[in-house]
Image (cartoon, rainbow, N blue to C red):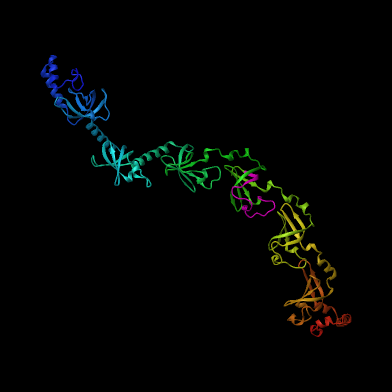
Amino acid sequence: MENERGLDNEKIPSSGEEIVKEIVNDETPAETFKEEFIQDLSSIVEGEIVEGTVVAVSDDSVFVDIGYKSEGEIPLNDFTKKPKKGDEIKVMIVKKESRDGRLILSKRKADEVVKWDQIVASYKEEHPVKAKIVEKIKGGYTVNLDGYKAFLPLSQAPLKRTEDPQKYVGKFLECKIDKINGKNNIVLSHRKYIEEEREKNIIEFFDTKLEGDTVEGVVKDIVGYGAFIDLGCIDGLLHVNDISWGRVTDPKKQLKKGEKLQLKILSLDRENRKISLGLKQMYPDPWDSFEERYVKGGKYTGRVTKLTNFGAFIELEKGIEGLLHVSELSWTRRINHPKEILKLGDIAEIMVLDYNLSKRTASLGLKQVLPNPWDDVESQYPIGTRVDAKVSRMTKSGIIVEMEEGIEGFLNVADISWTKQVKNPSSSYKKGDTIEAIVLEIDRENQRVQLGMKQLTENPWTSLKLKYPKGSIINGTISSITDFGVFVKLDEEIEGLIHISQLAAGKIEDPGKQFKVGEQIKAVVISIDEDKKKVSLSVKELLTRLEEKEIQKYIEDDTKKTGSVALGELIDLSKIGK
């Protein structure tokens, strides 16, 4: 039959006295047993933690053999989980004997002592502990550490500025024990745990990783010069130049915060704990196979990625860009900036002119995919052809005109007039004026057409030399008077100069007092300089050459013919002969 505890009476003696009776009945000397039993009980220390084995479990108690003559009894509610027969457990000896002669044991008190010892050991040995956040209080959190109340300051919690402190209530955190000032005064730090774990992981990272290894990271922050990548324990830098084989002007257009990436370790600086990462290195370099897809003289399409003063950059494919120089944009137009014909994002057909694999550069041409109007300019405008051209701009040395779209000609100031020295063409012409000119010369290689205006008419200097050879006497009209002499109009556009030193046989101080504009005057031709457009005359030479009688006769004959005395009126022989 079972007793009231539901156990077999033969297996569980009710008291120490019954044990003695049973042993006596088994013919064991009573005195010997009593002595051993007393010694056994005397070796038991109340409050001691001992190992025991569960020998029986009832509805409200657990019976444990701790190796003494008497088994101990523990209330079942001391256990969080109902034990099984044969389980090995740690218990505390609370009392040597109960009323019925059993040892009084406690699993709960043993657990408390064991847990406290573990807490103290974790503190001394700086081991991490797991704690549950119970509630938010002023300055931090109340924390449950294996049944003991602890405090986690807010500064040592994982809380971010923007987070709600209540979100961590009820969660478990790994912490380090910062201080122990008694069982009710334990201070924890999650931050210290995180920092120490991070430090261990960083050391492990540098000990196990090599340049060239592939790692996984998360984009943590994006800046103008690249992105910082969270590798779990440490951040690495992904420079803008290592994001893509192509041009990257804005990393934010290539990467997203929180994005996971597979990257190559480019360099490791263990001393300064710096890591350089590469994303483009995860893919083949397109320049390595450039010649498999591109040839000199080949025509391809590309996208305009950048415009500069000297040209445009064209992306042929991701990772390969070439320079389209401003001089290669048009056969005919003078392009000052590529934005005149291109804009960012345009798709353009171009020709590969040259490339350098070691420098990773390619020279491109846009005009080369179009017909060159200069190829047939000589047949279109043979030398001697008269053209009507529009003034496009002016320089100090001449006028640049547009003969047709893309074909310009140059009119030198020396070829504007046979008779006038044009020093500033802008004083006579303006942009947009239409002029008539003749083609003088064509330089197809350098794309130059030389034009002339004066060549549209005969050279008046040729006939002037025939009409007025050196030493001949001319009759002209005074057109202007200056301090240094008198200008005489010979033909419609040609003037000669009688220098003040050649106006008379003697000295003349002020030509304006003796000569007037519009009056006729005779003089000897001293020289004609076609290049300088200059005719030099001399009255003095005329006077020296003629004798007085001849002069007088000449005057008389002239008077009879014309009814006036031209030279006599202009020259007072009594004055200039002295």
Point out residue 373 in the picture as x, y percentages from the top left corner.
73, 50
> Is residue 69 highlighted in magenta?
no
For the point 32% across and 45% down, the residue is 154
Q: Quadrant of residue 489?
A: bottom right
> Is residue 348 highlighted in magenta?
yes
Q: Nearer the viewer, residue 366 or 269?
A: 366
Q: Quadrant of residue 5?
A: top left
Q: Nearer the viewer, residue 115 or 127?
A: 115
Furthest residue to the bottom?
574
**Vertical position of residue 330 compared to residue 491: above or below:** above
Furthest residue to the top?
27
Point out residue 31 in the picture as x, y percentages from the top left corner.
10, 19
Point out residue 371 in the picture as x, y percentages from the top left corner.
71, 48
What stretch of residues is rendered in magenta?
328-355
Q: Nearer the viewer, residue 94 or 358?
A: 94
Q: Quadrant of the C terminus?
A: bottom right
Question: In the displayed structure, does residue 287 sit left or right of residue 152?
Answer: right
**Vertical position of residue 34 compared to residue 518: above or below:** above
Question: In the displayed structure, does residue 462 sit left or right of residue 314?
Answer: right
Furthest residue to the left?
31
Point out residue 33 in the picture as x, y percentages from the top left corner.
13, 19
